[in-house]
Image (cartoon, rainbow, N blue to C red):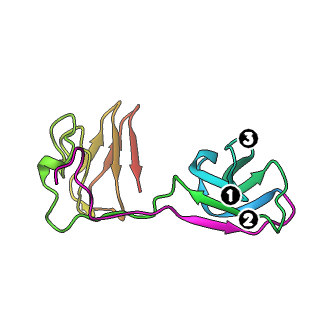
Amino acid sequence: MGYIGNQASSNFSSLAKQDITGNGGANYTLSTAVANANEIEVFVNNVRQEPGVAYNVANTALTMTGNVASTDDFYVVYQGKAVQTTTPSPASVTAAMLAQGAAGSYLGDATQLGNIIRVHEKELNTSVTVAANTNGMCAGPLTLASGVTITVSAGATLVVT
């Protein structure tokens, strides 16, 4: 049977739920941090509460505007939480599938600006200058060979993670 739209995925995800026992107060702790009240749905006695009006959240601190009794059915459904990811099978991602950088380079060429994915050795064997008004980044651990320098020009930024 034909269909309109994207082909169905063979991977599925579900939304995480947290049951909370009311304590007669308004302050509770979430099991997962969230960025804002819109990333969760809060239900009291199966009635959805309005984000920012009936509750607010900061990181894992959930604050209700009213008290929740221990006899209330009280739970949270996480809307903004990634609970499932898909890992591509080996060798299934091709160069054509990757977004091209401004200079058309996408993998490993340190001489090109606009790289999206950068692969590098653990030891730097050539001196490097990060030019003014550009950004540089490398992932560690990183060691410098004898006599090698990294120069960060005025107005440039280098981040080592």
Q: Quadrant of the C terminus?
A: bottom left
Q: Position of residue 75 (x, y in %)?
A: 67, 62
Report whether residue 97 is seen.
yes
Q: Residue at x 18, y 51 (%)?
A: 107
Q: Position of residue 98 (x, y in %)?
A: 19, 48
* Distance (Cα) linking label 2 and label 3: 19 Å
Return the residue nearer the eye: 41 or 128: 41
| Residue 87 in magenta stretch | no
Identify the residue under disc 2: 73
Name the main secondary structure of what is drawn in magenta: loop
Q: Secondary structure at mark 3?
A: loop
User: Dot 3: few (<14), some (14–19), or many (≥20) neighbours within 10 Å?
Assistant: few
Q: Which of the two discs, 3 and 1, labels the residue nearer the N terminus? A: 1
- Disc 2, disc 1: CB below 8 Å? yes
Q: Which mark is residue 53?
A: 3
Q: Amino acid at mark 3?
A: Val
Q: Secondary structure at mark 2?
A: loop
Return the residue nearer the eye: 134 or 129: 134
Classify 71 as above or below 111: below
* Distance (Cα) linking label 3 and label 1: 17 Å
Identify the residue under disc 1: 46
What is the magenta range? 1-25
